[in-house]
Image: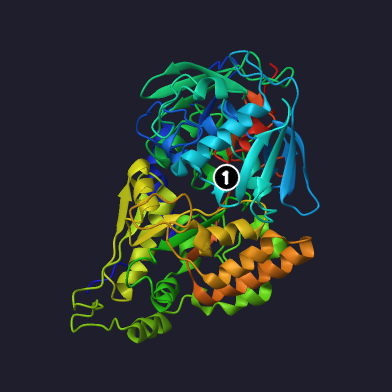
């Protein structure tokens, strides 16, 4: 079998960047007067579908529906490790940690002028209780009741101690009862003219290639937002989005940018900036554990050992990150990481010999033609799903497929537009799929999504988390203890135990900590997060943290 060899990095970089370089040389940076309207690149789509339903998963709706049009009670600030009050000014636990009292911010109104009250919060959670498909955080697995106490207090009663529930409850976007009580089916509702509390509620333009939002005239933060509006051109992939950024047509971009120092910063060092902190979750290769052979951890470990992560990080990611370790944790969880657990998972190393032994042991030997045989003797085939236009992930998928082919597994990278990709991911219609991970406050959330049985869904049913469909009763026991953790010392102990279990079982295959992508042009706007001013995660797609940025940005003075 002929094997393709990867060319040297320099040649590859030149090949990949030639179209960008030639395009830039043939066109000067755009001279435009944005008039206070910030242009954002955060979703790669060939055309826009009008949907502003904040109860749906992010991949199905337009940005910033969940955090920009609508708002949550609290925002967890990943960079600084703190909870920021938003529609709620504070929350207190009862002594037994079974009841949470949330005080709502006074003086908030919906964009149509109606007052925001506790009834709206209670109504939102009641919708989630009636429509399981909308309960993306699984709050009704621990929530027993939500009730209003007057206009400005909500009381959440829990079925059990569940301290991590504060973030799940706090991050839920809240909808207005007086509008949504007349919605017949909130699952299919596209909410084309939203009534909300956020800084940008007015849909001023909506075409299939561009949409624009205007600011909320009744926003509760005095003098904010300083921006007059937001503009979103449709870019089908990273390459097109990067070209627009290089041409000065985008102010804030949340996409991968190759060779960012040379292609972007060097063109205008005074105004072209970026910040890629490694707090964008962990990029995973999800093996579908509901299907053979990926239900066998030996096969999952063999696949992991066939991946040259050093090459993947160098070629696909331009050295912006580093290979993952066997805990799977990214830098947002750095204080929790156990060096012992990280060292315990030898399946994270690149070792083709041991990978072959594991497949032999699992019952997938090489045939006479060199291909691995599945149970029925046919070639073992495992394709890798990825999103069309996500150029960094596509190269990563190609490297992974190459490693699998070298192992004797028939494999190819299969790219789909985001909607089709995400539907397959949620329903478990894949063998192997690239994907992202949780980046919530503690490793509890991270490992609950990856190993907890509470997030399991049957194949074919949409899963909000646990797309790979792996569940462990041992993980459940540790997670249950974590739910009532008394302090950070307890959380640390339980996190280390979960890390060791993850390193033993290999439920998913961590590839690398994902940068929180953020490139920005300060010619017209200022106030973006940076390493010097790390007030929030910098990526526009980071909801609900993007609210911290949207309410901080200002037009630049002439």
- Local secondary structure at mark 1: helix
Q: Nearer the viewer, residue 236 or 67?
A: 67
Please tell me in which quadrant of the rendered image residue 116 appears.
top right
The quarter of the rendered structure image containing the C terminus is top right
Q: Specify whether residue 271 is in view.
A: no
Crowd around label 1: few <14 · some 14–19 · many ≥20 (10 Å): some
* Front-lying residue, 553 or 297: 297
Residue 397 in sight in this render: yes
- The answer to whether residue 92 is above or below residue 224 is below
Q: Quadrant of the N terminus?
A: bottom left
* Picture colour scheme: rainbow
Q: Is 60 located above or below residue 551 in the figure? A: below
Q: Tell me the residue at 39%/55% (across/down).
A: 395
Horizontal arrangement in the rendering, residue 496 relative to residue 257 (left or right) = right
Q: Residue 214: x, y in percent? A: 55, 17
Residue annotated with mark 1: 261
Q: Is residue 387 left or right of residue 58?
A: left
| Residue 58 relative to residue 447: left or right | left
Q: Is residue 146 left or right of residue 15?
A: right
Residue 106, quarter of the rendered image: top right
Residue 29 place in picture, x, y as percent: 50, 26
Q: Point out residue 16 in the picture as x, y percentages from the top left corner.
A: 39, 49
> Residue shown at 62%/23% (left/top)?
197
| Viewer-closest of 219 and 276 | 219
Front-lying residue, 302 or 54: 54
Q: Decide: is 202 above or below 259.
A: above
Q: Tell me where residue 170 appears, x and y as whole percent.
A: 66, 41
Tally of marks: 1
């Amino acid at each position: 079998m002929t094997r393709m060899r990867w060319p040297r990095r320099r040649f590859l970089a030149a090949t990949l960047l030639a179209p960008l370089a030639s395009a830039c040389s043939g066109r000067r940076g755009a001279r435009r007067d944005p008039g206070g309207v910030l242009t954002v690149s955060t979703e790669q789509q060939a055309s826009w579908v009008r949907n502003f339903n904040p109860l749906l998963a992010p991949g199905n709706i337009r940005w910033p529906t969940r955090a920009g049009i609508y708002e949550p009670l609290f925002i967890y600030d990943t960079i600084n490790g703190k909870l920021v009050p938003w529609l709620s000014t504070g929350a207190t636990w009862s002594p037994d940690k079974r009841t949470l009292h949330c005080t709502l911010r006074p003086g908030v109104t919906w964009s149509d002028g109606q007052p925001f009250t506790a009834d709206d919060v209670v109504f939102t959670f009641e919708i989630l209780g009636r429509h399981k498909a909308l309960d993306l955080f699984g709050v009704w697995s621990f929530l027993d009741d939500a009730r209003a106490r007057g206009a400005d207090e909500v009381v959440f009663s829990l079925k059990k101690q569940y301290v991590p529930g504060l973030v799940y409850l706090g991050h839920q976007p809240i909808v207005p009862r007086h509008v949504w009580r007349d919605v017949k089916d909130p699952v299919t509702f596209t909410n084309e003219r939203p009534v909300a509390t956020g800084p940008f509620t007015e849909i001023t333009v909506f075409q299939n290639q561009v949409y624009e939002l205007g600011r909320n005239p009744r926003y509760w933060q005095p003098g904010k937002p300083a921006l007059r509006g937001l503009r979103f051109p449709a870019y089908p992939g990273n390459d097109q989005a990067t070209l627009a950024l290089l041409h000065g047509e985008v102010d804030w971009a949340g996409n991968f940018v190759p060779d960012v120092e040379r292609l972007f910063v060097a063109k205008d060092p005074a105004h072209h900036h970026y910040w890629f902190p490694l707090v964008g979750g962990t990029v995973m290769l999800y093996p579908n554990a509901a299907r053979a052979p990926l239900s066998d951890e030996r096969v999952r470990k063999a696949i992991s050992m066939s991946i040259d992560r050093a090459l993947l990080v160098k070629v696909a990611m331009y050295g912006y990150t580093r290979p993952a370790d066997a805990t799977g944790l990214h830098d947002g969880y750095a204080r929790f990481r156990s060096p012992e657990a990280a060292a315990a998972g030898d399946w994270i190393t690149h070792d083709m010999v041991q990978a072959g032994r594991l497949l032999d042991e699992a019952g997938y030997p090489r045939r006479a033609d060199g291909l691995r045989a599945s149970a029925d003797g046919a070639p073992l085939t495992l394709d890798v799903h990825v999103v069309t236009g996500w150029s960094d992930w596509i190269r990563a998928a190609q490297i992974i497929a190459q490693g699998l082919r070298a192992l004797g597994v028939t494999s190819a990278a299969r790219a789909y537009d985001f909607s089709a990709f995400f539907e397959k991911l949620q329903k478990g219609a894949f063998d192997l799929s690239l994907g992202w991970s949780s980046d919530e406050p503690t490793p509890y959330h991270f490992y609950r999504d990856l190993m907890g049985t509470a997030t399991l869904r049957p194949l074919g049913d949409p899963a909000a988390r646990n797309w790979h469909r792996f569940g462990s009763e041992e993980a459940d026991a540790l997670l249950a203890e974590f739910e009532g953790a008394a302090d950070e010392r307890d959380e640390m102990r339980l996190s280390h135990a979960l890390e060791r279990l993850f390193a033993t079982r290999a439920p998913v295959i961590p590839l690398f900590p994902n940068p929180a992508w953020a490139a920005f042009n300060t010619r017209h706007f200022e106030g973006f997060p940076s390493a010097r001013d790390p007030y929030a995660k910098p990526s526009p797609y980071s909801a609900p943290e993007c609210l911290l940025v949207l309410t901080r940005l200002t037009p630049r003075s002439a």
